[in-house]
Image: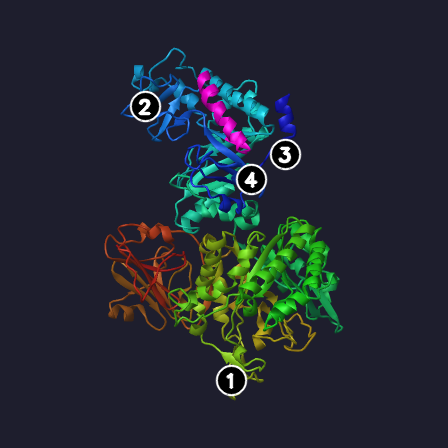
Amino acid sequence: MIRILAILFFPLILFSQSFLYQLQNLDINETANSNFNLVVTSYSKDGSLDEAYTIDELQKLHDTNKTVLSYMSIGEAGDYEYYFDQSWLDADGNPSPTAPEWLGHLNPNWPGDYKIRYWYDEWFEDFLKPYLDRIIDNGFDGVYLDIIDAYEYWADRDNYTNYGGIETLLPNDPIDDENRSAYLMIELVKKISDYAKSKKPGFLIYPQNGAAIINYDANGSYFDAIDGLGIESLFYVRDNKAIENTERVKLVKKFLDNGKNVIVTDYVDDGSGFKGENRKRILDFIKLCKDNGFTPYAADINQTLERINPIAKGLAAHLDTITQPLFRKFNIGIGSGQGIDFEAVDGSKVWLNVVDLMTPADLNISYYNNIKDYNLTLFEKIQSRLINADSLTLWIVKGWQESWFNKAKLQTLLDHNKTIIFNYWYFGDTIGGDNAIDLILAGKDEYLEDASRLGRFIADLNGTVAVVMEPEFNKASITDSAENSILFASILKEAMKRIRAQKSDVLLSICPMDTGIRSSLTSYGGYKRDSLGDKNEWSRFLPVIDELKDELDFITIQEMVGQFTKDSSKFPSDELISYTKDQLGLKDLPKRIENFSSFLNERYYLPVLLGYITLPETGWRDLNGNNLYDDGELIEDLWLDESVALYHRLKRNAKSLYEHGLFGFSPMALFDDPDHDLGGYQFFSENEYHIGIIATDATNGVAGTPRSAHITLKGLNGISILDILYSDQPYLFLDGGWNLVGLPEIADLSQFSAVWGYKNSEWFANINGFSASELESYGIHQLDTIEPHRGYWVLTDKAMLIPYDTNRSNIDDCLESTGWSLCSHIETEDIERSDLSFIWKYDRGSWKQRNSSNILYDSFDYIENIYLDEGVWIRK
């Protein structure tokens, strides 16, 4: 009956959201300030009575809503414990003639710990009961009972001297009788539970390991005696995935089925930081625990349990969030207004709902057919791509109206398992200047009420909904002052709480802007080149995020670059400044995004989203030298190749980006907007009208200008950015000029100016204007057939995209027995071999290398990743 009631009412028993397991050097203040709500620690700092944790110390933990369990070994005795008498040991550390009969021999795996014949009454009456009294009197909430699996030890005949072991066989030893040894352990746990709960009702009993003991518990008395279970090394044995653990997991889940909290400690953190394989392993462990209903603690790989693991501490407030489906894969979304206005046949407006482009809606309806020059086939093509988008990002600006949004359509989008992200741009550019805080304080009450209104608006949306606070957060007036940062963060925190009060499952974020130096020609920002990142600038907004981190579910970043912008140093003048590709570090931008994500993810352990990105394709030439934009000075498609290359790289590099904490990105806009930020500062000047991935024929810079259906899908040689981002077909991007790549087997060589291959130490080529005989006269063989495992030098007169395949090759099919080989369709792990001395690749005009001696060269970047579409020189 007791067990039935426990199952029915198990929510009354503590089910931890996070827990800490630290047996040495526990810092009470640090622990109190952490987000762990269950703490397992020793009774004493060093095992002595003098260093026992006091009621006052434990009260500090209770004051922060923490439940504290005292570790207590009941199957072994430690020579460091206060009750242990050193006279029990001889000079060799073995039990002496005067030792109590229940004291067994030393555990060779844990020096200082001795096996115990736990069924002896003296062990319970003279040692465990007084120990429990001290634990209870000092204010602990329960005990964490270790060495439950001692029942296996004493039943195993191999542990006795008669059979080659070390234990002397005594009359009451349960040799060869695991049923009896398990029964004796269950009886001991029941004694401990009955005694402790009689002294302190609600006292918690958590055994550690030994889960298989329930196989010997015919009447469920073991479940009746305990409140939870601790397990070690369930999914990982240090840095190795546990194998053949299926039955063990099933066994542990029986404790959940019987209403018991299960906490799991795997020793998975190798100390290398929250990156690479270590990050991947820790997150996998946490996800496996959460998927099975267990509470995880990622501990140090050395198993000393002598500190709070910093990664586990950072993740403690976010264990439920980081395991959500949204963060388990790489997402590619789209930014847009929900309604896109087009010119109707009669000159009025028709509003196309972008949700209809992202779901299988019927686009052949009379309302949409009223769009001037409506091309159903083209819009259905857009729909065929966007139906694969993972999310829709919408902007909520100060003064927003609910009528701007069709909630029924938004719910339809959620019903199709899409995510909706609201960029809550409230303060925006108004918080600049010396009086920024005064402006914020003056508008604080209105802002907080607006946040509550937003919470009420999204409250009944069922699905994954996120709100990103303050996109483009980059105000020096806030970040340059610690006082201002804390004040601003406190207001944002209150706004977040108000939103979450209305919708408890909303995901919340903040979006710092990627500012700072971008040049590939300087190195001030903490990386080899400033184009790779600017840690100095990125650190400016950290005090704000530090204050908000426990409220955040993820962090958002954004990237907006253009060939020309307004010269902010001459504000309020509209004078412009233009940039070269090197000044903006365009070729390093995908890596910069990866670095920015890693910078934040390693500090806060939170997933990172590239919330919006845009690289307008337009350029500017100051023909009259007045530093202003004038008619006729806009160059269409000047940087279209760079825009396409950027989106291509982000899609292709998704695996590496994800491993560095980034869980997705979205283009800033679907359609170009002819009046974007009209009347505002328009930092990007005419570029503001070209931030989408679909061009329109609307007249730019005229408020309310409608679009006609004359639209163009931005891209190269008939392949659009939509195709790149939202189809399963991979593409190969080729710069104008030389490229070192892999080619699809069916590639049409005539579309290239030249293709060169290398095989068996000989060159092969296919060059426009050269016959086979002419090539042979130079000792070069005619190249007619593409071998997919080989790499090729390809020369083109302009940038282009071609369909590609992602079939991975066996690197040994390409490698010569010795010397140089030119390979492709391989990945990073293929080159991690000791017999490969040098690896080189040529990426967008720059050489990168890796070598078996791990020598780094200042002149060349190190090869971190190899992608299937790259050609790679390899020396064996």
Query: What is the spatial separation of the Cα atoms under label 3 and label 2, in whole angstroms?
Result: 47 Å
Residue 361 seen anywhere in this rendered image of the structure: yes
Please state which of residues 192 and 691 is positioned toward the viewer in this rendering. Answer: 192
Q: Quadrant of the N terminus?
A: top right
Residue wearing tag 2: 89
Residue wearing tag 4: 59
Q: Are marks 2 and 1 in contact (CB under 8 Å)?
A: no
The first of marks 3 and 2 along the sequence is 3
Where disc 3 sits, the SS reads: helix
Where disc 2 sits, the SS reads: loop
Establish if 589 lies above or below 131.
Answer: below
Please state which of residues 74 and 3 is positioned toward the viewer in this rendering. Answer: 74
Classify 10 Å Cα crowding around label 4: few (below 14), some (14-19), many (20 and above): some
Q: Amino acid at mark 3?
A: Pro
Query: What is the spatial separation of the Cα atoms under label 4 and label 3, in whole angstroms?
Result: 24 Å
Query: What is the spatial separation of the Cα atoms under label 4 and label 1, in whole angstroms?
Result: 70 Å
